[in-house]
Amino acid sequence: MVLSAADNWSRTSVVLHEKLVQAGCRVDIATPGGRAVSGTLAAPLRLSDVRVAGYDVVAIPGGHGPVEDLYRDSDMGRILVDADAAGMIIASVCHGPAALLGASTSDGWWPFAGRRMTACSGLATRLKELGAYYERGPERQAYVVRDGNLITGQNPASTGPLADAVLEALGVPVSE
């Protein structure tokens, strides 16, 4: 799970983490520079040290933080390009899909062009400019879009259903 190093992280981080851990998943946390984001997450991995081999999912929760740093973090971009090329699950919710904006291949191609996704409405224009097929569900209601290995949620209410979609994609039973 990749969290912003900015001070703006949200409850979506906690909900996503709890649901995955309760389902028996091992969750490592990484931030730019390995910056601690709370007392309970005092020793995250340095994003620059993370390699996708050995992982099944790259999860990016929401909050305003991703709009402050992850969208322009070259390590985040590298991780997303590598994860997508490997067919790994990439899951993000609310403002988290801002992190997708910084991903580009060595020839400048955005790997999520032509893909269906959702995010908070403030990201819609930029995602569409890059070639995403942006979808929007009812306001303030859960809405999750899955396009192959990419799973996105529209808003904080989508966090639980997004976690369930990740678990389903992993073949892990989802408990109600």
Image: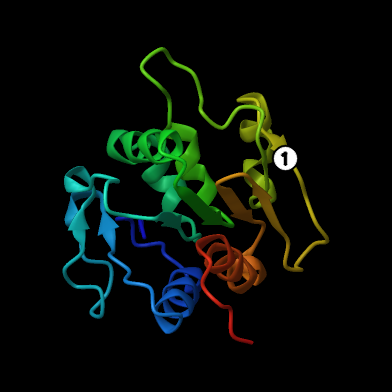
Coordinates of residue 115 in the picture (x, y in percent): 65, 35
Q: Nearer the viewer, residue 6 or 170?
A: 170
Coordinates of residue 173 in the picture (x, y in percent): 56, 77
The residue positioned 47% from the left and 41% from the top of the image is 87
Colour treatment of the image: rainbow
> Is 90 on the left-hand or right-hand side of 136?
left
> Is 79 on the left-hand or right-hand side of 64?
left
Image quarter of residue 55: bottom left
> Which quadrant of the rendered structure holds the N terminus?
bottom left
Coordinates of residue 29 in the picture (x, y in percent): 28, 63
> Is 156 on the left-hand or right-hand side of 45?
right
Q: Nearer the viewer, residue 82 or 15?
A: 82
Q: Nearer the viewer, residue 109 or 73?
A: 109
The residue positioned 47% from the left and 61% from the top of the image is 61
Q: Which residue is mark 1?
A: 134
Q: Examine the rendered structure and indicate whether residue 24 appears above or below residue 126.
A: below
The tally of labels here is 1
> Which quadrant of the rendered structure holds the C terminus?
bottom right
Q: Residue furthest front?
A: 171
Residue type at mark 1: give it: Tyr
Q: Residues within 10 Å of mark 1 (few under 14, many from 20)?
A: some
Q: Examine the rendered structure and indicate whether residue 10 appears above or below residue 99.
A: below
Image quarter of residue 114: top right
The residue positioned 48% from the left and 56% from the top of the image is 64
Q: Residue furthest top?
A: 107
Q: Could you tell me which secondary element the residue under label 1 belongs to? A: strand
The residue positioned 58% from the left and 66% from the top of the image is 168
Image quarter of residue 27: bottom left
Q: Nearer the viewer, residue 116 or 172?
A: 172
Q: Examine the rendered structure and indicate whether residue 124 appears above or below residue 105.
A: below
Q: Residue furthest bottom?
A: 176
